[in-house]
Image (cartoon, rainbow, N blue to C red):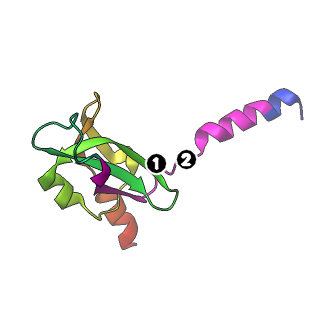
Amino acid sequence: MSKWTVAIFCVFFMFSCDLDHKKKCEWKLIPDIDRKEDDSIDEGYIPVCARNFITKKQDCRMQATLEYAQESYGKLFRYVDIKIKSVALPRTVESINFDRCREENSK
């Protein structure tokens, strides 16, 4: 095999893998206690993190309403299924599609 073939294969492999597990049902939305005094959080919202306890990755640049955080607490989801309302920091979680993970867990 030529060097170019190996290089193209490696690049294809790198982009096709889900190294961060963002497409796996391993994420949970949990309150971020460390940022509860953060002034950047809008009124009526609480700071939350999307955490993957398997890979130990997290994204804590988010906020959600208390009601939505309580409703979502402990439910597994895919990180790619988070719908963000605002892209400015902190990002506001609009909704999360839990259906794919329910279907996957029911099999």
Secondary element type, mark 1: loop
What residue range appears in magenta?
7-34
Question: Taking 56 as reference, is 49 left or right?
Answer: left
Looking at the image, which is closer to me, 90 or 102? 90
**Distance between mark 2 and mark 1 Cα atoms:** 7 Å
Badge number at residue 14: none
Quarter of the rendering occupied by the N terminus: top right
Quarter of the rendering occupied by the C terminus: bottom left
CB under 8 Å between discs 2 and 1:
yes
Question: Taking 14 as reference, is 29 left or right?
Answer: left
Q: Quadrant of residue 98?
A: bottom left
Magenta stretch: residue 107 in it?
no
The residue drawn where x is 50% and y is 62% is 54
- Is residue 94 visible in the rendered structure shown here? no
The residue drawn where x is 38% and y is 69% is 105
Residue with the most extreme bottom position: 107
Residue flagged by tag 2: what amino acid is it?
A: Asp
Residue where numbered disc 1 is placed? 22
Taking 7 as reference, is 94 above or below it?
Answer: below
